[in-house]
Image (spheres, helix red, strand yellow):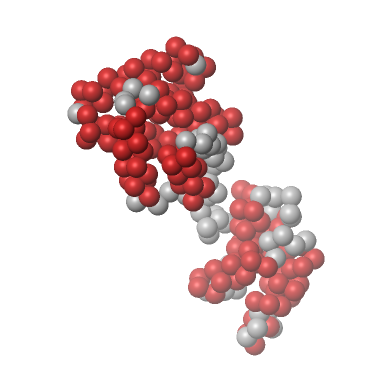
Amino acid sequence: MNKRSLSDRRRAIYTGLKPFFDDPSLMQAVTHWENRYSDQPSLALQRYVADICQNPVLKDKRASILRSLLHAMTQDSAELLADPRGPEPATPNTAETASASVAYSVLMLAMMSQVDESLQHKLRIELFAALRQRQLPPTILEALQNWLGTRQPLKLNNAPSALLQKLLNQYYVLLCENLGPVRADTILARGVAQVQRQHPELEPFIDSLL
């Protein structure tokens, strides 16, 4: 059972318990399994059933509930009920995510290098203030803070392309507000051209950011 995905194992638990529990109690039982037994072998199910069958009615059905769970474990994925937690999020391709992060970093540097030092400093402060309001994941916010505040290398290897696109757009908005849309468009176009010229391997990822 443990060789199956967490979603399939949760579906098996949900399927096996469904005939015996009402919906609120069923989800409580699923949550208990997730918290205490999701990493345990199948033999631990007897203890799990004892945990969730405390009232007299369910106590009398323990044997039937255990059989139902054991049967659900052997069923093919197609025979199980849908995951009550919904589908698991897709895992982004690590290489693709890293390359998108590199493309974002290089493009941002190419754009920032086109404005003078005082404006660079001002834009960094305004950008971080704007990003703090976006409720970004803590690791990403910390990486941006280190980069904007101390100019350490920007490390966003776990950031999805959609988020990087929003971060780039936020900087473009600040350029428009400080320099006007015509100058902002020029800075963006020159930055893109510079990255395409110096790092042609990043062009597909640059396209995904624009």
The residue drawn where x is 38% and y is 24% is 113
Of 51 and 141, nearer the camera is 141
Q: Image quadrant of residue 207?
A: top left
Of 145 and 46, nearer the camera is 145
The residue drawn where x is 51% and y is 28% is 102
Residue farthest to the right, as pictured:
43
Of 106 and 57, nearer the camera is 106
The residue drawn where x is 41% and y is 15% is 194
Give the vertical position of 199 relative to 58 (above or below).
above
Asked whether, in this view, residue 1 is left or right of residue 159, the answer is right
Asked whether, in this view, residue 134 is left or right of residue 93, the answer is left
* Image quarter (top left, top right, bottom left or bottom right) of the N terminus: bottom right
**Is residue 80 in sight in this rendering?**
no
Give the vertical position of 107 relative to 6 (above or below).
above
Give the vertical position of 179 relative to 50 (above or below).
above
Expressed as whole percent of the image width and height from the top left, the position of residue 139 reads: 52, 47
Residue farthest to the front, as pictured:
118
**Is residue 117 in sight in this rendering?**
yes
Of 157 and 32, nearer the camera is 157
Expressed as whole percent of the image width and height from the top left, the position of residue 70 reads: 73, 63
Expressed as whole percent of the image width and height from the top left, the position of residue 35 reads: 64, 66
